[in-house]
Amino acid sequence: MANPLIPKEPIVPDLTSKQIEQLTDITFLPDVTPVLSDAVFVFGGTHPGHWERPIEAYKKGLSKKIIVTGGVSPTGIKHTDWKSPNTPEAEIIIAELLQNGVRRKDIVYENRSRNTLENILFTKEVFDFSTIQSVLIVCKNHAAGRQYRTFAKHIPYPISCISFGFDAEYRGRMISRNEWMNSEAGRARVFGEYLRIVYYGRLGHVLPLESEITDLNKYVELNVRTE
């Protein structure tokens, strides 16, 4: 059976102010002050934020352990500064960590995963999550809701998760919690994240939403395609 795909930037319906508020709460994790945590969990990706944020957390003493994930994504669009398209994301991230003072003994990694779900599943093969109680999650802020829900679904331990992510720019516009709704790219990216959370929640791949947004569910079916 072909894998369902949802466009990174689907067509976005007109959104009410209430729906914008709901989409923000679902796709972004709460903006809270980071605290001392047992580990930093870095989801795979090619944006510089994937190494800049864990380096910042490490230097601030927020955590002494960094868990790095990421192989070579077959579908992801590389960041414009990414120079090694065939090198696993984790290897580039680790190289940056080491160059910036992170000790190798403080790094755990997997370098085979091709998507968010595999980031979690393959890391479970090399790290015992029952040894920690708290993590800082590093990923793009507008994708943090989906990343967290994937983590929460597949790590069966009571682990506290706090977002320590970063805003990303698309088509010249920064996609942030307070500004995403003001640009075409922002609205499309955030709406795409909502569609994935709903769809993968229904499949059981991520922690499902407690309540889906009224009048937007039909767009899940309209935007899912197979290849």
Image (cartoon, rainbow, N blue to C red):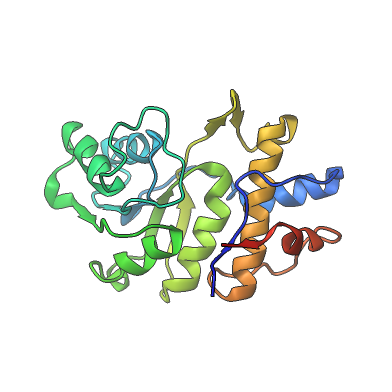
- Residue 101 lies in quadrant: top left
Q: Position of residue 99 (x, y in %)?
A: 17, 32
Q: Position of residue 102 (x, y in %)?
A: 18, 40
Q: Compare residues 137 and 181 and report the one nearer the observer.
A: 181
- Residue 62 lies in quadrant: top left
Counting the numbered discs, the total is 0
Residue depicted at x 32% and y 38%: 51
Residue depicted at x 47% and y 52%: 162
Give the farthest residue toward the top: 172
- In the rendered image, which quarter contains the N terminus? bottom right
Q: Position of residue 23 (x, y in %)?
A: 72, 50
Q: Position of residue 188 (x, y in %)?
A: 69, 41
Is residue 170 at all visible to an observer of this figure? yes
Q: Is residue 127 above or below residue 178?
A: below
Q: Is residue 52 left or right of residue 187?
A: left
Q: Is residue 177 above or below residue 81?
A: below
- Residue 201 lies in quadrant: bottom right
Q: Is residue 199 left or right of residue 143?
A: right
Q: Is residue 182 left or right of residue 121?
A: right
Residue depicted at x 67% and y 57%: 195
Is residue 178 at all visible to an observer of this figure? no
- In the rendered image, which quarter contains the C terminus? bottom right
Q: Compare residues 105 and 215 and report the one nearer the observer.
A: 215
Residue depicted at x 84% and y 48%: 18
